[in-house]
Image: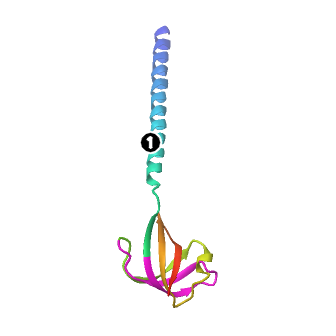
Amino acid sequence: MRLYLKNFLVASLLLVSSACGAQDDSVRSREQMGLVDSLAKVAPTLYGAHGLVKSITPNRKHMIVAHGDIPGFMTAMTMPFAVADSALLSNVSPDDSIRFVIEVDGSKIGVNSIEVIE
């Protein structure tokens, strides 16, 4: 009986110590994942562009712009852009030529600056 009890205690200690080691590994993994997450959060990228406003949505949250090539980002096309603040569109009308700044933050793309070109 004593041998059985001794073997049981040794096995239990091994099991507990291996579980503690696994917990330490999972803690390290969580810490490493936190580091990876923080490295993945990169500052937004800004692109300057020129274009012609085709239309503005009634709620003034989007505008459709025929724009030229935006080097390093996209080729010329006509497309909608979300506007960071509807106040940016207060002096903009369809058929206005504009200079604008596009902010790309992960999968989010929006306009954060608009200037009407005379």
Q: Which residues are magenta?
A: 49-71
Bin the neighbour count of mark 1 within 10 Å (Cα to Cα): few under 14, some 14-19, many 20 and up.
few
Where residue 36 sits: x, y (%)?
Answer: 43, 48
The picture quadrant where one finds residue 68 is: bottom left
Residue beneath the point at 45% across and 84% down = 51
Does residue 69 show up magenta in the picture? yes
User: Looking at the image, can residue 55 be seen?
Assistant: yes
**Element marked by disc 1:** helix
Q: Is residue 105 above or below residue 24?
A: below
Using the image as rendered, state which of residue 46 and residue 79 is in the foreground: 46
Q: Could you say which quadrant of the image residue 21 lies in? A: top left
Residue found farthest to the front: 118
Q: Which residue is mark 1?
A: 32
* Rendering coords of residue 112 (x, y %): 53, 71
Residue visible at 48% across and 73% down in the picture: 101
Q: Which residue is rendered at x = 43% and y = 73% of the image?
A: 48
Number of numbered discs overlaid on the protein picture: 1
Residue 70, image x and y in percent? Answer: 38, 76
Q: Extreme top residue here? A: 2
Q: Residue at x 49, y 24 (%)?
A: 16
Type of the residue with mark 1: Gln
As displayed, is residue 105 above or below residue 9? below
69 on left or right of 87: left
Q: Give whichever of 68, 16 is nearer the camera.
A: 68
Q: Main secondary structure of the magenta part?
A: strand
Q: Is residue 111 above or below residue 6?
A: below
Using the rendered image of the protein, determine whether residue 107 is visible from the camera's viewpoint.
no
